[in-house]
Image (cartoon, coloured by chain):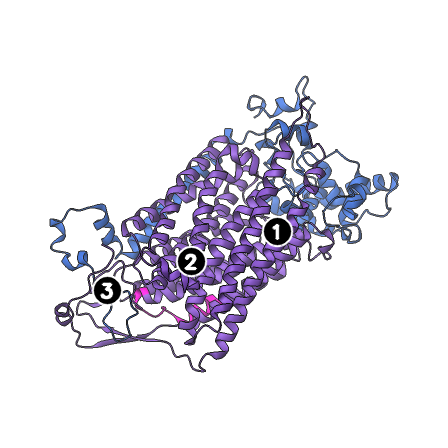
Chain colours: A blue, B purple
Amino acid sequence: MATRPSPTDPPAATSVVAETAPNALPAMKQTIFRRHRQLEGWPLVFTILVTVGILVGGLVEFIPLVLVKDNVPRIASVKPFTPLEAVGRDLYIREGCVNCHSQMIRPFRAEIERYGDFTKAGETVYEHPFLWGSKRTGPDLQRIGGKYPNLWHVRHMEDPRSTNPQSIMPPYAWLLKDDLDFAVIPGRLRALSRVGVPYTDAEIADAVANAERQATAIAQDVAAQGGPAGLERKEIVALVAYLQRMGTDVRTSQAPAGATATDVATPDSVH
Amino acid sequence: METPASPTPAQTARRAPAQLDVFRYDDGIVRMFVIATVTWGIVGMLVGLLIAVQMPFWKANLGPYLTFGRLRPLHTNAVIFAFAGNAIFAAIYYSTQRLCKARMFSDVMSRVHFWGWQAIIVAAAITLPLGLTTSKEYAELEWPIDLAITVVWVVFAVNFFWTLYKRREPHMYVALWFYIATIITVAVLHVGNSLAIPASLFKSYPVYAGVQDALVQWWYGHNAVAFFLTTPFLGLMYYFLPKAAERPVFSYRLSIIHFWSLVFIYIWAGPHHLNYTALPEWAATLGMVFSVMLWMPSWGGMINGLFTLRGAWHKLRDSVVLRMFVIGITFYGMSTFEGPLLSVKSVNALSHYTDWTVAHVHAGALGWNGFIIFGMIYWLVPRLWRTDLWSPRLANWHFWLGTLGILVYIIPMYVAGVTQGLMWRAFDDAGRLVYPDFMETVTQIVPLYWVRVVGGSMYFTGVLLAAVNLTMSIRNAPKLLPDPAVAMPLSPAGRHGGDGGHAALAD
């Protein structure tokens, strides 16, 4: 087989094992390798065995994660995104923010000092898809909500150098110019409700009006702080709405007397 | 045991056929996939070069459609599914026919597979800059394209398995095992991770949320590496390396052990991408343990590859094909040692989210996948186009530019990753962060991003040289390239009447 046989050569297919099979085979030591040799002639069996082999690991890891509720402890204060925040999240996805920003604070002191409390599983139960990210070219954004005023975000998206001269982030000035498509919101929420986000029919029916109210409030706030006016129907307000919501459900859940944000996330206090 | 006993004249005479079974291999489809490989390789790496420049130089972000966030998925999709994908198909179509001693089952299905796949790539190149993305890494394409991928993959699978069914060579050589694992597992991964409910034509939401979505995504993401960038390339290596070295594979037994352990263990490793996240700790630990176990089957492949060259190392002097294979397999060994290392939680705590990961994947992608692909192409060109390679000298330049380019790429990225990881966690004596301003940790590594651009440019230049070499070789090719004809004896026992020879790699 070392040389390339010409097309007229007999096939170089011969082996000692097969030459003696099948009669001599029982006499031989039935090693696993000889059995495997037989398997190499049975593509169907081979393919079935491969399929079983590759399914085991995935199922063992996935099934308990879905069936055992303790794996993802619910947090009472975590609510679905508002209609405007939901489409803002879609803009975050469209622009590929996740390529450079994580939303997953690991339980290390260095990360908690820098970004805030670490991320709990229960905080992400309405996230279709998850946006934890895998690279921090920029900082983690899990607890960005409420950290800066609305105007800061508008300025930052328009020109990142205006808020941090050394920033390497691309500008997203078109978000201030392009109109937000409010009409898609009900369809988006309906699809989200189909995958398990508990939006009611009434909420979906009111979604556009709800989004317009929130957009107007943000736009007025930006204008009041001295920022550009007339952003009510621009994409930027949706993105700002989402950014200001991020990671705040746990921090704002101080309502139960004596409960701290961390307490809320411990398994004892979940339902 | 690896060298099959040559048939003695007596054996040959005993089995002398009354009739000859004459058939032709379909090499046209292989030529198509080879050209597509090089073309998309250039596109994918050019996008990579652009986003590499965008990192230290934000002004290279050109308008909404050509920003880093939209182009990075285009780069990864193009190099994985267009460059490596077409190369895998070229390898599978070339070697499967020869290993099965059969033409592909259906020329039409082969062409549907080819054009369908190219259409999917074009669709990706249009939709991703438009911001139509699911955001799930290496699975960013929206649901209509996902459906098209499923259809094309099924066509490919039917074509492949039917060829396997009507093969004339009863024994399946180890390369075919890896192809089987690839086709089955990629189908399972793609469907499993892409389950979504559409909200409109180009917008959908995955059925999984949060933690479950993360687990499914990295079950997919890690095994895209395993079953798109590893198993088909091992199959490719098992066919083309012995061919190029003119030596049988080192160990048949090792190939059995490392095949099954690799296929079984790889699937478990996904959660190591989620160490210290909100994923339950048991799952992350399971991922880590299996990732460490994966080291051995991975090195089984490396050892079987490198030891195949026993007694043939002198051939490296004259063969750019073998040199590329050896560098490729060596990078495979390094990456599959580094992978388990990075999955260990204490290492991952430092490396995760940094450019260390970027260095790791590019050692694998440029070193292992890239060099195995170009080694294969340099070996295939004279055989597919029936002409000498236009310039072995240029291929040699490609080899050196590529090898040095990889090093100039990955070394600064390792430095950047470790530097930034250490800066993020640095505390002073008073227990305060030394670098509380994230910006400080970025400006520190910006110069290293420029060095990376240099390394990437070197590698890219090598690829351009390969394209020139391929183009000029094709221009020298004869006008008519008839499919190679093969004649083999009609075995009296029918399709399964022949003998199996593991190391038999007949044309």
Front in this rendered view, residue B318 or A216: B318
Q: Is residue B201 visible?
A: no
* Quadrant of the image containing the C terminus of chain B: bottom left
* Quadrant of the image containing the N terminus of chain B: bottom left
Is disc 2 on the same chain as disc 1?
yes
Front in this rendered view, residue B349 or B163: B349
Disc 3 vs disc 2: which is toward the camera? 2
**Pointer 3 with pointer 2, Cβ within 8 A:** no
Residue B202: x %, y % from top left: 62, 56
Which segment did they paint magenta?
B99-116
Q: Amino acid at mark 2?
A: Phe
Look at 39% across and 59% down and name the residue there: B236
Residue B218 drawn above or below residue A19: above
Residue B492: x %, y % from top left: 17, 70
Disc 3 vs disc 1: which is toward the camera? 1
**Residue at which label 2 appears:** B325
Look at 54% across and 71% down and name the residue there: B468
Q: CA distance from mark 1 to mark 2?
A: 24 Å
**Residue at which label 3 appears:** A13
Q: Which labelled disc corresponds to residue B452?
A: 1
Q: Quadrant of residue A142?
A: top right
Q: Amino acid at mark 3?
A: Ala
Q: CA distance from mark 3 to mark 2?
A: 26 Å
Is residue B102 magenta-colored?
Answer: yes
Label 2, secondary structure: give it. helix
Label 3, secondary structure: give it. loop
Q: Of label 1 and label 2, which has the lower sequence position?
A: 2
